[in-house]
Amino acid sequence: MPAADARQVADVYRHTQARITQLLTGSDAGVWASPVPACPGWSVRDVVSHLTAVAQDWADGRLTGAPTDEETAEHVRRFGGLGETELLHAWSDATDRLHHRVGTTGREPPLGDIACHEHDIRGAIGKPGARDAESVRWTADRLLTMLRPPVPVRVAVEDREYHSDPEGRVEIVLHTTRFEALRWRTGRRSRSQLAAMDWSGDPARVLDHLCLFGPARADVVE
């Protein structure tokens, strides 16, 4: 990725981190302990711990892709001795280092991870918002560009269409939004929710190829 584009991604990451921090600053223990339906077994604090650890490891060059299950479990444990305010400060420091790293390596930060987890947190605490944020637009664009089901699909969002077939052939059309695309591509929708989307025909042949991981075991309602 060109350095200028990577810096833009780093700016969007920083804005997203600041938005989540503002959302949680001053929250009581009950909010931090809230279960996150999109991440079964995790609390809001666990999600923030994961995001903080990913930012640290990415800035240090220890992480270059999606973490393993073992690494993710360690992320949740890493900050057990910190209070919530200290945890947010640790994440802010790691974000600053991520931003600096872009200037020295040209390597973009993990924007897709934070874009997805912002809405996991919002869903958990009942504060939806930022669904048209640049983090959503950028991540949905990348995820839809990568979509390669076995049947040619055209995905129509608010301002663009994505063709999964390089030759432009279409067998089935899905009308959705960038926000919804972010959520179902990252496994935040159940198979029944995937099937109930606005398809032009029977989606049975593509349902098992829509999610990078997942789908969710139960409906995720946001």
Image (cartoon, rainbow, N blue to C red):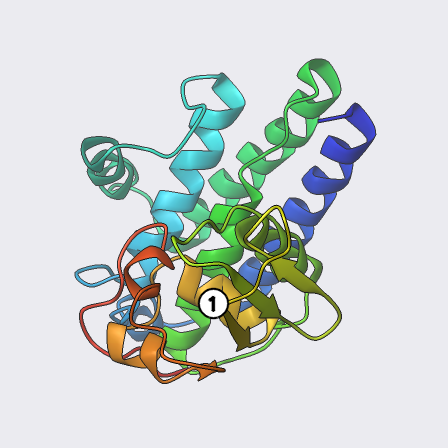
Residue at 65% across / 21% down in the picture?
101
**Residue 156 or residue 122, whichever sits in front:** 156
Q: Which image quarter: residue 57? A: top left
Does residue 217 appear to the left or right of 129 in the view shown? left
> Looking at this rendering, what residue extends furthest in the right direction?
4
Q: Is residue 50 visible?
A: yes
Q: Is residue 25 visible?
A: no
Residue 210 higher or lower than 59, as above or below:
below
Provide the secondary structure element on which disc 1 rests. helix
Residue at 64% across / 72% down in the picture?
157
Does residue 76 appear to the left or right of 164 in the view shown? left
**Residue 24 or residue 53, whichever sits in front:** 53
Q: Position of residue 11 (x, y in %)?
A: 73, 43
Q: Which image quarter: residue 204? A: bottom left
Q: How many marks?
A: 1
Does residue 112 appear to the left or right of 204 in the view shown? right
Q: Position of residue 192 (x, y in %)?
A: 26, 80
**Residue 165 or residue 145, whichever sits in front:** 165
Q: Position of residue 22 (x, y in %)?
A: 59, 64
Q: Quadrant of the C terminus?
A: bottom left
Q: Which residue is mark 1?
A: 119
Q: Quadrant of the N terminus?
A: top right
Query: Label 1 amino acid?
Result: His
The crowding category of the residue bearing disc 1, from other C-alpha atoms within 10 Å (few below 14, some 14 to 19, many at least 20), is many
Q: Position of residue 92 (x, y in %)?
A: 57, 42
Residue at 54% across / 61% down in the picture?
20
Residue 138 higher or lower than 67, as above or below:
below
